Image (cartoon, rainbow, N blue to C red):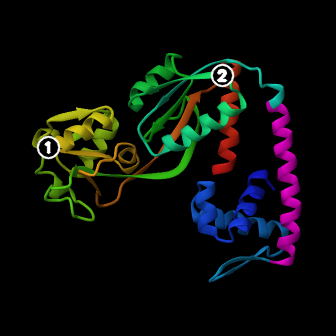
Amino acid sequence: MELRTLRYFLAAAQEENITRAADILHVTQPTLSRQIMDLEKELGTTLMLRGKNGLTLTDDGIFFRQRAEEIVELADRLEQSFVERNADVSGLIALGASEAVGSRLFAKLIKQFSDKYPLIQFHLYNEMADNIKDRLDKGLIDVGLLLEPVDTAKYDFVRLSQKETWGILMRDDHPLAERRTITPDEIAAHPLILPLRERVRNEILNWIKRDEKDLTIPLSYTLLSNAALLVEAGLGCAFCLDGALAIHSSPRLRFVPIAPEHTTRSVLVWKKNHLFSPATSLFIQEINMFRAKIE
């Protein structure tokens, strides 16, 4: 039985609703349901009754909740005691991040760590994934947030739980702006703004089922912030992720998912078997503790 499982159970008991608890924990509803069912199987008893009005603890569930709260509180106090011992740790950590909804979790992680170690500073580089990997390999960045596809063979990594959906960013007066989804044939005739990253670009071209020479591509981009401005100016439609759009929203822009659906996820990576600074080592420990809460 893992501490993470106890936190999952306590969140569900507190919210009395699997969906709300899953949102708070940043996991999917099936993942949370499976963890609780596995816990009940391990204990050989039913802890929660599932009904139309939500979750209700059984007598065993009430007893288990009391003991779980004691264990989690003790673990938190133990962790805090080590935080207080290391409160005077200082240093600099270099981070790289792609534009993605995973950036929100990354920001939460950085804030959580900064509260524990206020003397440690961060440098954050916002670039496309290939540039971040290059900086990682050269030792210029300690930890990177990348969008899949990512070759993780030479990295330790944590894959974040949120899925991100590919779609088309267009002006609100575009002929396809009111569509619920867009197919390759519908978008191929329009000017397209594509990511510069080669692996992602190849996936997009495979989805469109056309050679690049048969498309009108007035611009390629590394970060969506400038591309979104050019979409708004009427240069073309941009392939992007819904998570990146959330960072650069505008009332003049519409995001329409592609069909068939294509999703990806974000990955936190750092070098394998690498001797990091004390500050970075602590941050990687924080990532692994964070993983235990979101998986």
Give amino acid for label 1.
Gly
Residue 249: x and y in percent read 33, 47
Q: CA distance from mark 2 to mark 1?
A: 44 Å
Q: Could you tell which of marks 2 and 1 lies nearer the N-terminus?
A: 2
Magenta span:
58-83
Residue 71 colored in magenta in the image: yes
Report which quarter residue 53 is drawn in: bottom right
Disc 2 crowd rating (10 Å Cα; few below 14, some 14-19, many 20+) is some
Q: Which residue is mark 1?
A: 234
Residue occupying image coordinates x 81% and y 66%: 42
Give amino acid for label 2.
Ile
> What mark, if any, has residue 186 been given in the picture?
none
Residue at the outermost front position: 251
Q: Which residue is mark 2?
A: 120
Q: Nearer the viewer, residue 107 or 68?
A: 107
Q: Give the position of the N terminus as an image quadrant.
A: bottom right
